[in-house]
Amino acid sequence: MDLHTNYPELSDLRRRAKRRIPKFVWEYLDSATGAETTKHRNRQSLDRIGFMPSVLHGEFDPDLSTSLFGADFPLPFGIAPIGMSGLIWPDAEGHLARAAARAGLPYCLSTVATQSPEDLAPHIGKDAWFQMYPPRDPDIRTDMLNRARSAGFNGLILTVDVPVASRRERQTRSGLTNPPRLTPRLLAQVAMRPAWAMGIAQRGMPHMRMLDKYKSTSTQGLSSTAHVGYLLRTSPDWDYVKWLRDAWDGPFMIKGVLRPEDATTLETIGADGIWVSNHAGRQFDGAPASIDMLPAIRAATTLPIIFDSGVETGLDILRALALGADFVMMGRAFHYALAALGPIGVDHLIDTFKKDLIANMGQMGARSLQDLPAPIDLDQRV
Ligand SMILES: Cc1cc2nc3c(=O)[nH]c(=O)nc-3n(C[C@H](O)[C@H](O)[C@H](O)COP(=O)(O)O)c2cc1C
């Protein structure tokens, strides 16, 4: 079967994924917060960014490679951290880490994933990053950093756009709790998705394995949500960032930055990379589209910029790079691909992005990612 014939675009994978995972899991993966206007704004703002086609360049194979923090990558994108990834598809963390390693791309593991750094150590490639939700206890903090480092993760990401718990109304409506409690309603949804159910039955109900080690007497008796909340103080401050900077000797990125002034301050206090993101609209429905903030943040810092939020195509990747990003990450897209077709779906999606990058760079006459033309605002042209 030629996957490019049957699934030429991410939307084809998304449609199939929706038919293969239970409703409550779909709502977890696909939803945003509030009326989901930030999520839609991400798409609308990306669509507004165009490029003038440039003709008569003759034949050429565009160079899609780039480098970040001194490492070379064949393609300018990677896999963003997703909590409870293994609930979305059985062994998602393993499948995605292996796919990233095969393609030579970075994979990020979330603190609240369903596999620990140790679980993933045999599967990661040369560039894997650990995303931290900040534990309040300094001993746990140090231990988590040591575990990530010893498992082979060489980049650290501190996510700062979850200072309070998000209200994800669509997800709540679906009946999903933390940990997932299989009520008769949820079980009915599971019964309709046999491939997902079999995979989960084989591996056991997913939970946040990294945190198992820290179940102490002080948190016994707390519900699982309270336990996670107790461990992971999700509202760090500037001192916390400085502490982490001193404690980690590899690339250190701050994820969830939208204000140019914050990027400047983060550079001053020693961050290595600014990760521009609105968490795909999952945290704050009043936030601007991440892509709209990119030019001002580019102007405010000399640090490498990593970008995410609603990227769905090679053209979207080019839009972000042309507006000042050095690297692009995607979260949901890879999970749609995995749920749709299994691990082969992830390889296929990477290849789809590659083909789309080549097709669009051909239209612009761009021979490399460093050679992209300045973007134009399509709304101003019509
Ligand atoms: C289901 C889901 C879970 C997520 N969990 C985390 C997480 O644990 N840590 C984190 O930093 N970001 C998390 N994110 C945000 C992603 O890392 C990333 O910022 C976002 O998904 C990018 O947008 P995209 O999904 O449109 O590509 C999550 C996103 C989704 C969709």
Image: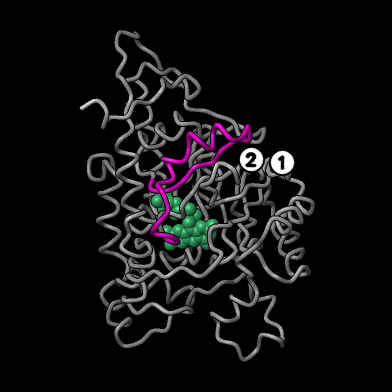
Label 2 neighbour load within 10 Å: few <14, some 14-19, many 20+:
some
Q: Does the magenta stretch include residue 302?
A: yes
Q: Where is residue 143 in the image (x, y as percent from the top left)?
A: 75, 65
Whole-number angstrom distance, CA of label 2 to CA of label 1:
6 Å
Q: Does the residue labelled 2 lie within 8 Å of ligand 1?
A: no
* Residue drawn at x 46%, y 52% as measured from the top left: 278
Q: Position of residue 42 (x, y in %)?
A: 36, 47
Q: Does the residue labelled 1 lie within 8 Å of ligand 1?
A: no
Q: What residue type is labelled 1?
A: Thr
Nearer the observer, 222 or 58: 222
Tell me which segment is drawn in magenta. Answer: 282-310
Residue 30 in the figure: left or right of residue 119: left
Quarter of the image where the C terminus is located = top left
**Mark identifier at residue 268:** 1
Q: Is residue 142 magenta?
A: no
Nearer the observer, 239 or 190: 239
Residue 197 falls in image quadrant: bottom left
Label 2 sits on residue: 264
* Residue drawn at x 54%, y 65% as measured from the top left: 113
Q: What residue type is labelled 2?
A: Thr
> What colour-coding does the image apply?
one colour
- How many callouts does the rendering have? 2
Quarter of the image where the N terminus is located = top left
Q: In this view, does 65 lie above or below 174?
A: above
Q: Is mark 1 on a helix, strand or loop?
A: helix
* Residue drawn at x 27%, y 28% as measured from the top left: 380
Label 1 neighbour load within 10 Å: few <14, some 14-19, many 20+:
few
* Residue drawn at x 63%, y 35% as measured from the top left: 303
